[in-house]
Image: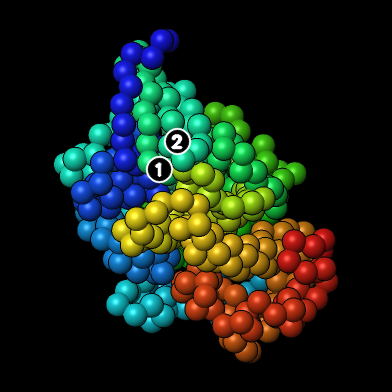
């Protein structure tokens, strides 16, 4: 398609997920000239993250988008319970999640696609141009980056001062501007929203491992609950086929999980997503000339930690602050973002690997190791320090949580984070 329009925008944002739509709303609200390009024609439930860690809630407050999360049904969860196959349900470790982040209660559950819809709409109200259904987007980095895309059967070319790459895990912008990522997969996972689960205690989130699955149950209020499962690579095909959703729900009917039978009998309320749980470490910097990557485009954790949304909001906060504070938007301006993100992600990857080895490995050796680790953590709660990574910001987790000592104590048969076990 020949280019039919050409123009300028101060900031072009590629991708309207939480990172992109929040950045668009914030920047348009500051009076910036923003073009938001989203590939999909509308936001729909993609069965991705819908649980926001308390430190992410704090970021949403700071950057000014908390009202959108609440308007999309933001449901506060207060207690975390570890119901696990190796212990009696009555002895489950519980954790009050509301007492760690000043000014914030517990984590929030919400409908992510509704948040993105509202943020993109708000960006439009504030003057941004929002293009849904933008296809074949290409980005040429440089002091004056160029973005080309197709929409409504026409080809467009836009010159920008800055491009924010927010296209998620497939990294449409990062790949084009030559920022590589090293990926690893520890296990597979799945997600599904259900409704009609009125028995489930509405402010309790649960996780645990039993048999050949690790489960996470995250309530969203009024009987709606987000279900996540993690399982071994070797069993990755188990939820394929016409009975896949049924089998996914049945997998929650576990001896260790109160209300497991009710979960199995609940009603699906959206699509099921099954796929590898991928962690991605950027090979270089999330900044190129004229381009800054945010959200999953800038590197992503194994979703077992549930911090992708908090990461996205922190990225938006830091990058929009740097844009507001600096006239020069060259790569050097974003060095504080690059440094902070590298340190943040190193800590999150570390915590995710411990949780993967502890909770998402299966078979007799893994069961024995988990039984031993839970007994140790019951005796001495300080050993759960790494679990704080899902609750408080990574820099607020004590250094002790990242020591070899913790790994040696909890995972004595492991060769360290990411090592064979
Ligand atoms: C099963 C699962 C469970 C998860 N659970 C949690 C959780 O509980 N808590 C948590 O914090 N995180 C969780 N995550 C991670 C979380 O969903 C992501 O980290 C988060 O959505 C990243 O936001 P983003 O805006 O960077 O990317 P995305 O949400 O992926 O948004 C990217 C957007 O860019 C668009 N796009 C892609 N390519 C193009 C293109 N070429 N041009 C224009 N637009 C494009 C996409 O359509 C999409 O709208 C989970 C992820 C998965 C898969």
Percent of width and height locating residue 276: 63, 44
Name the side, left or right, on which 191 lies relative to 65: right
- Residue in the foreground of this view, choosing between 308 and 192: 308
Q: Is residue 319 above or below residue 1?
A: below
Name the side, left or right, on which 166 lies relative to 279: left
Circles 1 and 2 in contact, beta carbons < 8 Å = yes
Gap between marks 1 and 2 measured at Cα: 7 Å
* Residue to which mark 2 is pinned: 145
- Residue in the foreground of this view, choosing between 389 and 200: 389
Asked if ligand 1 lies within 8 A of label 1, the reply is: no
- Residue in the foreground of this view, choosing between 109 and 222: 109
Identity of the residue drawn at 36% across and 21% down: 156
Q: Is residue 294 above or below residue 417?
A: above
Percent of width and height locating residue 167: 47, 39
Percent of width and height locating residue 256: 57, 66
Percent of width and height locating residue 62: 30, 66
Category of crowding for the residue at label 1, using alpha-carbon neighbours closer than 10 angstroms: few (below 14), some (14–19), many (at least 20): many
Category of crowding for the residue at label 2, using alpha-carbon neighbours closer than 10 angstroms: few (below 14), some (14–19), many (at least 20): some
Residue 392 appears in the rendering: yes
Provide the secondary structure element on which disc 1 rests. Answer: strand
The mark nearer the N terminus, 1 or 2, is 2
Provide the secondary structure element on which disc 2 rests. Answer: loop
Identity of the residue drawn at 35% across and 69% down: 58
* Residue to which mark 1 is pinned: 162
Q: Is residue 36 above or below residue 379?
A: above
Q: Which quadrant holds the N terminus?
A: top left
Identity of the residue drawn at 28% across and 50% down: 27
Q: Which quadrant holds the C terminus?
A: bottom right
């Amino acid at each position: 398609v020949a280019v039919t329009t050409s123009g300028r925008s101060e900031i072009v944002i590629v991708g309207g997920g939480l990172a992109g739509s929040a950045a668009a709303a914030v920047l348009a609200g500051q009076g910036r000239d923003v073009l938001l390009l989203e590939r999909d024609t509308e936001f729909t439930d993609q069965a991705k993250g819908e649980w926001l860690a308390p430190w992410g809630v704090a970021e949403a407050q700071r950057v000014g988008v908390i009202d959108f999360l609440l308007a999309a049904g933001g449901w506060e969860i207060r207690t975390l319970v570890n119901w696990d196959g190796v212990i009696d349900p009555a002895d489950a470790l519980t954790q009050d999640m509301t007492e760690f982040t000043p000014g914030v209660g517990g984590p929030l559950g919400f409908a992510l696609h509704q948040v993105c819809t509202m943020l993109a709409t708000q960006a439009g109200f504030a003057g941004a141009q929002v293009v849904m259904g933008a296809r074949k987007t290409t980005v040429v980095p440089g002091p004056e980056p160029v973005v080309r895309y197709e929409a409504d059967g026409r080809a467009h070319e836009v010159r920008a001062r800055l491009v924010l790459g927010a296209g998620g895990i497939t990294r449409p912008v990062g790949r084009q501007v030559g920022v590589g990522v090293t990926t690893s997969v520890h296990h597979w996972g799945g997600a599904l929203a259900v409704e009609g689960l009125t028995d489930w205690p509405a402010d309790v989130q649960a996780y645990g491992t039993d048999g050949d699955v690790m489960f996470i149950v995250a309530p969203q209020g009024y009987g709606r609950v987000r279900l996540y499962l993690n399982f071994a690579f070797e069993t990755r095909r188990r939820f394929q086929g016409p009975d896949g959703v049924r089998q996914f729900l049945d997998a929650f009917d576990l001896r260790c999980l109160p209300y497991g039978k009710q979960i199995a009998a609940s009603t699906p309320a959206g699509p099921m997503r099954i796929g590898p749980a991928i962690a991605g470490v950027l090979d270089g910097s999330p900044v190129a000339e004229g381009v800054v990557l945010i959200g999953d485009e800038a590197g992503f954790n194994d979703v077992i930690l549930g911090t992708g949304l908090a990461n996205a909001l922190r990225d938006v906060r830091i990058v929009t602050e740097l844009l507001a504070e600096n006239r020069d938007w060259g790569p050097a301006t974003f060095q504080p973002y690059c440094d902070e993100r590298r340190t943040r992600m190193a800590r999150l990857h570390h915590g995710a690997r411990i949780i993967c080895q502890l909770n998402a490995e299966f078979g007799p050796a893994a069961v024995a190791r988990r039984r031993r680790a839970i007994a140790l953590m019951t005796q001495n709660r300080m050993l759960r320090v790494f679990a704080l990574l899902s609750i408080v910001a990574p820099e607020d987790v004590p250094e002790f949580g990242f020591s070899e000592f913790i790994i040696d104590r909890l995972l004595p048969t492991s060769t360290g984070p990411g090592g064979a076990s």
